[in-house]
Image (cartoon, rainbow, N blue to C red):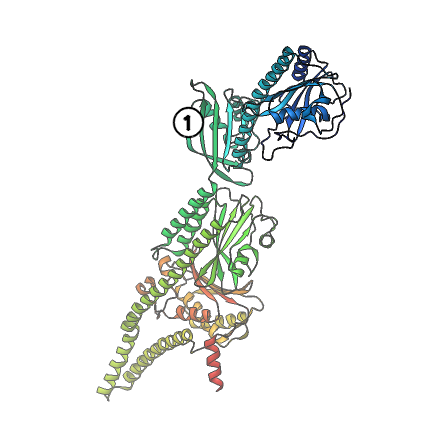
Amino acid sequence: MAFAETGRAESGRRDPGGDLVPGQARLTTGTDVLSQAAADHLVTLMAQAAQAPAAMVHLLDGEQFRLVGAHGLPRLRVGGPSPSLPSMLGALVVAQESPVVISDIAADARLSGKTVTGTGAYLGYPIRDVDGAVTGVCAVLDPQPRPWQPQQVTAVEHGAQACTAFVVVQRSASRADEAQRRLAALLDSSQDGVAACDAAGRLVFSNKANQELNGELPHGVDLREWIQQQLALTPAGTLPAAVSPLVRALAGEHLHDTEITVERPQQRPSMLLADAQPITDADGESLGAVVTLQDVTQRHTAAVLKDCELTIRRLLAGSDTSPADELLLEVITTIGQMLGWAATEFWAIDEVGNVLQRHLRWTDERNLLPPGMPDRLDHGQGMPGRAWQTSEVVWATDLHTDPDACTQTPHWGLLRSAVAVPVPIGSVTRGVLACYSAYTEHPDDVRTAVMTGIAAHIGQFLERRRGWDLTTELGHSRDEYIALVGHEIRTPLTSILSYTALMIDDPDLPAGDRVEMLQVMQRNTGRLQIIVDKLLDIAGLQSGHVTVDSRRMDLSAVLQAAADTVRTCFPDKDVTLDIDVPGEAILWGDPRRLAQVIDELLANAFHWADDASHITATVAPDGPTILLTVSNTGQVIPAAERERLFQRFFRTQGALTNAVPGTGLGLSLARTIIEQHGGTITAATDDDPPGTTITARLPTSRPAPTPTAAAHGAARHR
């Protein structure tokens, strides 16, 4: 007898006409439900018991029957689609969901209208799953028509029941596997890491998040023994974060929100929270342990950033009496220590040279900043210069390749990343906060926002300090002005008035006495004239009513001329004046006004220089500026007085105690003139040998006309 292969067999419940009933559920069962050997052995026994030459087991696989066991059918491929006749007859069993007994296939009415290419007898029983649904057919065939005896029918029924038992067991296992796969898929979709081990300490599960947090964990080994081996080779901080909690839970511990710090090469440490507990059966016997790891690095970082900002705010609040530089150094130190930077810097804009000058620096104990880094940056140069130029936060994820960072220095050593944050005063950038990291940093909105907030606090502090300094200086000026009026002005006026009254009251004064009185009056009048002239100069320059007449000039020549003059003014002073100037020091300035400055500085130095000492005056180029310095050895000015040295009317305690003549206006006038040239002037003291150095920095470029100066120029031409 031959069986023709006419295509894929259909499965499912059929209506009386033989068509598939729409919507009928089908059970798909893989070919691994019955093992090949078990199925072949079963059908062989079934064929023998039914006294049939051929037997087979079909299982439903989607829309097809799969032949999973056969006896006496050498032409049929086991595991492949069945030929049409057995499939057609099997479909009848599935459709009826009951046994099909056919003595003569050719004469059976149920096959009327079907294309049947074969004869013989057929006996088939349905195979069911645990829910009772038909999942296959157990059948015997005979190439000759024949009646089936009851014991033969029973043999096939028992074969189907045996197959059903296999299907039930395998289906239950399949459901368990499916549940496990669903659980694994669910855990893989979780952002928290999950890992589990069995009672022997062997890893049995690790989801994707856990692998990302820990890397590949060891399989097939007792984690308790493995961790001891690893601790002998590597520090505890380099072990996978999940291992230690698992081992502790396996020993019976219950962990909740245990903090774990994970170190990674060139990356900031991650902060994890671990929850771990043992797994036991109903009798309390250990089945293993499970751990979950939650990455709270971002949450922890946000909290630290907020704490840092609050700390900075407290440091800068109500701090008007503390030295500004001390507070700023404490601020950048706090930023570095709390936020884990390797180094922090505060860059101030030098308006004299129109450059960015490093003002303060802090580094951690590793001191990773490379040597030779520039202390001065042009507009747009380096990361701080770029932040100054754009007034925006600038990040460098890789300092070694970042174009801005490479213009700052090409050799960053162990440093990896940096951020530069502009420090605003009002709407203008007046400084830059730069932070450097040994880790690979990635910009994020939270850190950028907090760093911008910290920079704003620094800017507000600098603006507040400037206002406080101006208020303090105004108060001191008022007090010193009262003292000046009470002494420097009243004393010569009293002398003038007294001698005038004597001369009026006694017209017969001897000529010699009259001349002496007139000389005193002239001397005191001259003193008053100096005070008035300096006050008018300062007021006029500061208000803009008096302007500097800038032109291209040589500061070296001005210093040489002033030095020749001042030597003649102190003929009795045993002091040597040394001048060190380049051939030319060209800048744009007012020669007459700058000569006033040099006269004041040299006269001040002569007044305070020790006998048999040296005064040194130098002019030296310094990038886009020229430095004018005057140094002398002598009494050291205390730091508190040094800060007020250029305030109007201020005189040091030493000057008052030693009755040194002066008005307290000379250095104030010098500062006003230097500032009108766009420069700065500062004083510093030395202890060995003791003395004072005053330094004026002047820009070499031609200054842009101020609105006030332009207005006065227009007025002169009307």
Front in this rendered view, residue 230 or 4: 4
Q: Position of residue 257 (x, y in %)?
A: 42, 34
- Tell me if residue 30 comes above or below residue 690 in the rendering: above
Does residue 560 sit above or below 364 in this rendering? Answer: below
Q: Is residue 15 left or right of residue 684?
A: right
Q: Tell me if I can see residue 29 in this picture.
A: no
Tag 1: amino acid: His
- Residue located beneath label 1 in the image: 254
Residue 91 in the image, given as x and y percentages of width and height: 66, 26
Question: How many C-alpha atoms fall within 10 Å of the one at disc 1: few (<14), some, or many (≥20)?
Answer: some
Residue 473 pos. (x, y %): 35, 65
Residue situated in front as seen by the camera: 627 or 244: 244
Foreground residue, 121 or 405? 121
Q: Quadrant of residue 491?
A: bottom left
Which residue corresponds to the image point at 59% horizontal and 19% vertical from the top-left?
Answer: 164
Which residue is rendered at x = 51% and y = 53% of the image? 420
Residue positioned most to the bottom: 507
Q: In this rendered view, identify the residue nearer to me: 68 or 557.
A: 68
